[in-house]
Amino acid sequence: MVDSPHLEGLHLDPDIRDLLTGFRQHALYNYGEMIAVKQVVEHPVDHDEIEQPLLTAVTAVFAEPDNFDDLFNHLRDPGSVLVLNLPPNAGRTTLAYALLARLQVEGLTSQARTLRYGGASDFPIRRLPHEKNQGFLLVLPADEEESEYQVSPQFGSRIHTLTNELRSLDNRLVVLTYPQQWRRISMGAPEGVAPAVSIVAPSEIAASWLAAEEPNLPRQRWLSNAEIQKLLRGGTPTDTLQIVDLIMSAHRRTLGYSLEQPNYQADTDEGRAEFHKLVTEVTEARRNWRGKLLEWHRAEGRTSVERNFLLAASVLRGAPVANVYASAAALSTTFKEKAELSTSGQSSPGIIELLDTVEGEVTEKGTITFVRPGWDDAVLEYFWTDRPLARRPFLTWLAEAPIKDRQEALEGLSQQEREALAQRIVSFALRWAVRHRRQEPLSALAAAWHTSQAESRTRRMWNVLVELLSSAAAQETSSYLHEMLLNWSKSDRPALQTAVIAVCASDFGQVHTVKAFRRLKKAATPPDTQVTATLRVTVRKLWAQAHLRQALLEFITNWCRESGEEGTGGHQAFAALASAPSPTDPSLPLLLDSSDEQERDRTMGMLPTGWTTLLNQEPGSAQSAEAKDAVRLWMSAALRDERLGEPILGSLRQAVAPGGPEGSQRRRDRLRTYVVAWSQEGEQTLREQRETMYARLSQLLDNDLSESVQRQLDQDAVDEEP
């Protein structure tokens, strides 16, 4: 194998190399979608800009397809649109970032930004930013059969209009879709807008990553080895990164060898033998060390104490060794073993003896590490498969591991160590859910960490679970997680339902908007106090995303129209938004905090349904108190800004109009009561202004009532005619 010219002499800034490490780890964690690097670079999923360090990192590891120059040439002209029609986990996001990076390098754009599609079927062209010389990335949301949501079949034909808008500001656009979707929406698209992309060999991807992250590693020797080539052959980019990770782990371990140990890079018999040993380790690790673990467990004299210590050490990677020892004792107790691990006295094996048995070592930081790469993950998977009847007690112990202090251990876990441990445990649970379509570890963590959520120690554990689950579920390849979240939302278990709603507030809700809405609604029915509190927080977080606002309000409005328990969540969602002030201007309702006049008008048009629900709340309840506060906020905004006065009064007027939904008279009386109370607050001058505003609203309500009575009289007269 010969390196590509761009790999020779590649030297990266240490910060970029650290970024690449996080990039690779999160890509592996999220099963291949490189957009997962948002965890590493200031969460670009929450912002428009694709930051320069990210583009630099992608460029460093990018293995160009043979027709990369041709793909780039599609973007040279202002207004160009390039559709990358590739399945998920095919490196499409990395390819898009590389194209956007090159646009900047060649001076054709000054910035790269993401566009969010939003929750509607059509992508509103008006949402295109007005800045010049931009390179945009638009990821089309996956078609969702379960909710009958699909990207509009007219998308392809609208690319012509997109091109004109982009050209006017010297901008360019890369669109990500997948083959099945593109076949459905491509009718009318410009010819050649979605060219084929050449396949990049896994060995080239591996060479690029190794050169960037570990430039001193002899990559040609590794990648020309027959066993390594066999592992790489036909693999996905994710498979390739897993092998890269194992190769780098094996190489880095040799850097700590003493002078007496053979150098695997040496062209000697000893060097070649050592290299063969490392290759064998990589291939065994790729197969989860199944053979070696079976051999270890079957060894004569193997005890439950040793097995439990190995399992505890594998789970508690990075924890102080004394904590691992005490936790292994707790695991033996959890399993009700006959031979328990006693931490007092010397009746049981000590740490040194057990470490030798499980082939582990203690680092300078006092934590346990294993010589074999990937050994700890393999231990967990072996146990799960080998001991199905021990899973339930193991999950109980697992959930307690980052929370409970083991009194026997002198060194407790710091909060940082607890969070790192929680991340490892959630990572294991997510991998297991995706690989084996089993949700038990995740649901056990949600149940255990939700119970004590108010406690400071557990709150962060819960947040780690929500953050990582949302990040993983945001990926288009995570169909099982989407199914699992839907099942959780219908489970009638508040812990799982709360987790679903919290997940919808983050990346999952932004990327899979319609799926998130459906799960929100399911999880909030029937109502539960804890679930409802999380729902209110979630809808406010989603409202902060401008591209979701209209779809969110339309969803909530339709939800409010449902009766009984089905509509209770809709009321709570609308109340949370209607009663909230703008974070930038407390005198302005959150729902009106927009500089887009068209968006504000559309918001006003949807408000009457929500106001109807809000004013239906019985006096004396917490909901009626919130309705009163909301009316006070909106009337104050109407008084302060004359431009808002008429539309605000109009939306309230429609909510209590005669002939509307049942109970209009009660709603009208409550509205008058709330506005009268508001008008009598404040200094004398302010009260006079408020009383004038109340009189204005009251006159409108009286006019509506009078017109309704007159219409009824006219209809009665017509009915009486012979």
Image (cartoon, helix red, strand yellow):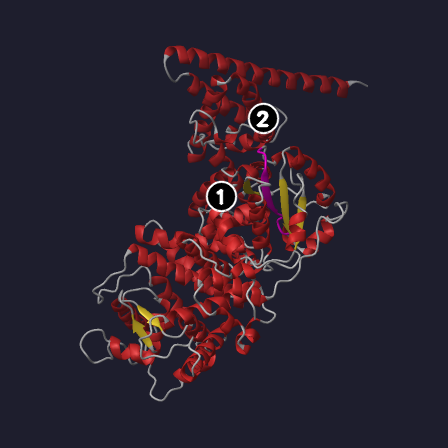
Mark 2 = which residue?
Answer: 597
Residue type, label 2:
Glu
Left or right of residue 84: residue 579:
left
Q: Which numbered disc flags the more N-terminal residue, 1 or 2?
A: 1
- Quadrant containing the C terminus is top right
Q: CA distance from mark 1 to mark 2?
A: 24 Å
- Quadrant containing the N terminus is bottom right
**Residue 697 in picture, x, y percent from top left:** 53, 17
In front here: 244 or 401? 244
Q: Residue 460, which numbered label?
A: none
**Residue 10 in picture, x, y percent from top left:** 48, 58
In front here: 620 or 391? 391
**Residue 689 in picture, x, y percent from top left:** 45, 12
Q: Which residues are magenta?
A: 131-142
Task: Give the residue drawn at x 53%, y 14%.
Answer: 696
Q: Is residue 576 above or below residue 249?
A: above
Task: Give the residue drawn at x 52%, y 53%.
Answer: 58
In front here: 483 or 239? 239
Image quadrant where residue 322 sits: bottom left
Residue type, label 1:
Asp
Q: Is residue 180 above or below residue 573?
A: below
Q: Is residue 513 above or below residue 67?
A: above
Q: Residue furthest bottom?
A: 300
Q: Determine the secondary structure under disc 2.
A: helix
Magenta-colored stretch includes residue 137: yes
Dot 1 surroundings within 10 Å: few (below 14), some, or many (20 or more)?
A: some
Mark 1 = which residue?
Answer: 46
Left or right of residue 610: residue 457:
left
Q: Residue furthest left?
A: 345
Dot 2 surroundings within 10 Å: few (below 14), some, or many (20 or more)?
A: few
